[in-house]
Amino acid sequence: MGGWAETGGYFGPDGKRVNSGGFYSMATNADGSVNQAGINTFADSAVDFIKKYGFNGVDIDYEYATTMKDAGNPLDHTLANGRRAGLVKGYDALMKTLREKLDRAGAADGKHYLLTVAAPSSGYLLRGMETYQMQKYLDYVNIMSYDLHGAWNEYVGRTPRCSTTARTPNWRRRACTRPRSTAAPATSTPTGLPLLPRLDAGRPHQHRPAVLHAGLQERAGRHRRAVGRAATTDCPAGAG
């Protein structure tokens, strides 16, 4: 549930985005305090939904519950920036509440309902997420390692691989090792495979224009690998 475009709103039947406040206002009040009433309403609805339609759990993609300014969709900045100081606290309360309600439902149904999240790989975003303390409520954390590259930086490379060799750039090493330095155990932090790669060179997207082609051109004649640098865009720093 959620996503880069959906965190602060939703898409109506006409395909247009409705700026409802989404996770930002549902979990955190305007003064930065936890909106427990909103969290309870959402968690009850989520549990009812998975039970009704036979799902095995809930996955939350909240982009992004970080204190770093201008993170996430630029359309949400006006709403989110005023709540930055309380977003991590609200996110933690959301995970705790979902875990408790899922466990109660699981006990009644004789099964375990999963609670997972999509977590950023960006060092910029993770710096504002404290120690990712909410992971203790989760079955596992899916790291969006396909977002190591994008229009927000100048690097082009094999985004899914989370290696930390001597040749690994510092920015990637930090993103790959950050989860291990927090409360999240390595066995519960899968990295994202290239289901969402930056290969769409012919069709630039609003917030994820491809830079792979330029990187390939620059590296041609040297290593002939999809690794290198390309010109950056004016994409906001927290967009990825």
Image: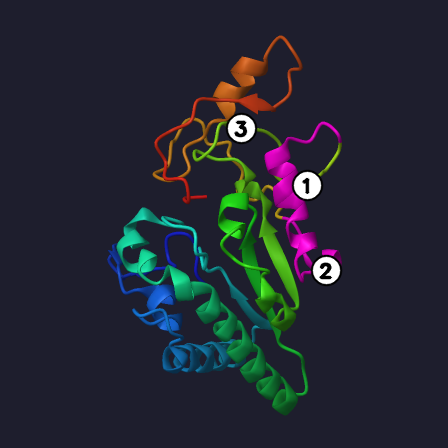
Q: In this view, does 91 lie above or below 212?
A: below
Residue 28 point in image, percent of width and height: 37, 70
**Residue found at x 40% / y 62%:** 85
- Give the class, few, some or many, for how many residues have Cα within 10 Å of label 3's Cα (few <14, many ≥20): many
Q: What residue type is labelled 3?
A: Tyr
Q: What range is drawn magenta here?
A: 166-191
Q: Mark 3 points at which residue?
A: 155
Give the colouring mode of the picture: rainbow
Residues 227 and 88: in front is 88
Q: Does the magenta stretch include residue 167?
A: yes
The answer to which quarter of the image holds residue 220 is: top right
Q: Is residue 16 above or below residue 157?
A: below
Q: What element carries label 2?
A: loop
**Residue found at x 63% / y 34%:** 170
**What separation in Å lies between label 3 and label 2 (alpha carbons)?**
28 Å
Q: What element carries label 3?
A: strand
**Residue found at x 30% / y 64%:** 21
The answer to which quarter of the image holds residue 20 is: bottom left
Residues 43 and 127: in front is 127
Q: In this view, does 126 lie above or below 211?
A: below
**Residue found at x 34% / y 31%:** 234
Residue 45 appears left or right of 179: left
The extreme bottom residue here reads 108
Residue 175 appears left or right of 203: right
- Give the class, few, some or many, for how many residues have Cα within 10 Å of label 1's Cα (few <14, many ≥20): some
> Sequence-wise, which precedes: disc 3 or disc 2?
3
**What separation in Å lies between label 1 and label 2 (alpha carbons)?**
15 Å
Q: Residue 162 carries which label?
A: 1
Q: What residue type is labelled 1?
A: Cys
Q: Is residue 239 above or below residue 67?
A: above
Q: Which mark is residue 185?
A: 2
Residues 195 and 40: in front is 40
